[in-house]
Amino acid sequence: MLTVNGPGAAFTTLFDEQDGTERVLPPEFAALYASWPLPQPADERPFTYVNFVMSHDGRVSFNEPGHHGGSDISRRDDHDRWLMGLLRARADAVIVGGSSIKTAGNHVWTPAAVFPEDAEAFAALRNHEGRREVPLLVVLTRSGNLPKHAPTLDNPELPVLIATTADGARQAQEILGDREWVRYFETGAELDQHVVMQHLRQQNIATLLCEAGPQVYGALLRDNLIDEAFVTISPIMMGETDERRRPSLIEGVAFGYEQPPQLRLLSIHRHDSHLYLHSRYER
């Protein structure tokens, strides 16, 4: 029998209209959160879902040295950490931007890294659903300017695909040198996200978790490449001034009022004063 420690208590379900009975979570996980049926991927790209934590006023980063990540916003909430681990556990690959690598410090994008208390349960879930031991890390970067000794690029047990331009590939290879666990995929003179997604699907990536920053999220959303969103709403307020810029959920793109992207709410869960939203983009 699978043992799942969980975040200490089950999530409280406030609303749940998730559809489907196939590819659901094992009961040990579902009892803590929800059944979460995984939709089948399209032929041309992976099923792609994004995960963010944001403040009550919609900010996703304090954007200060050593405080770029979401843990400062979630206040290291155990339920947010556990859910993040679960989202990673069901992903064949995790996609981030080059800037995320630069600000991540010692972080690596595995389920165990964010919630080690359930490392064995997450590994068992991955095995049960036919996934590799750890997700492939996909790094989107135009320039290829990556930190040489970033732990997530420096570990032979963590496979990496750098998706970049022709110039970016040369730059990254010059910095990183020969690393057997790091592969490159070039899309030509420009970074073409559609081509990257097609390549990932051809490499049998069926589920893709986006943990990139607001710029990448905005770019993927602009190109209609995001299917679902998991957003934790933290009870803190952050604010912003001209001197202290705090990015919101998406940046670098402004949608028109005629037909902006719209989400359909699938579920809302709660623990204490945190809310956990799961939504699907309407096509």
Image (cartoon, grey):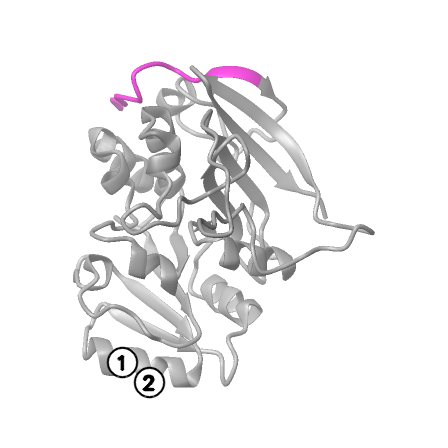
What residue is shown at x 42% (from left), y 15% (from top)? 272
Q: In this view, does 198 lie above or below 131?
A: below
The residue lying toward the viewer, choosing from 146 and 199, is 146
* Classed neighbour count for the residue bearing mark 2: other residues with Cα under 10 Å, few (<14), some (14–19), many (≥20): some
Q: Where is residue 151 in the image (x, y as percent from the top left)?
A: 19, 58
- Is 110 left or right of 17, judged from the image as shown? left
What residue is shown at x 45% (from left), y 28% (from top)? 236
The amino acid at mark 2 is Arg
The residue lying toward the viewer, choosing from 124 and 183, is 183
Q: Is residue 166 above or below residue 213?
A: below
Q: Position of residue 36 (x, y in %)?
A: 50, 30
Q: In this view, does 114 lie above or below 275?
A: below
| Magenta residue span | 1-14
* Residue 231: image tag: none
- Is 2 left or right of 53, judged from the image as shown? left
**Circles 2 and 1 in contact, beta carbons < 8 Å:** yes
Q: Quadrant of residue 152?
A: bottom left
What residue is shown at x 57% (from left), y 68% (from top)? 194
What residue is shown at x 32% (from left), y 82% (from top)? 171
Q: Badge 1 is on which residue?
A: 173
Question: Does the rendering let one see residue 129?
Answer: no
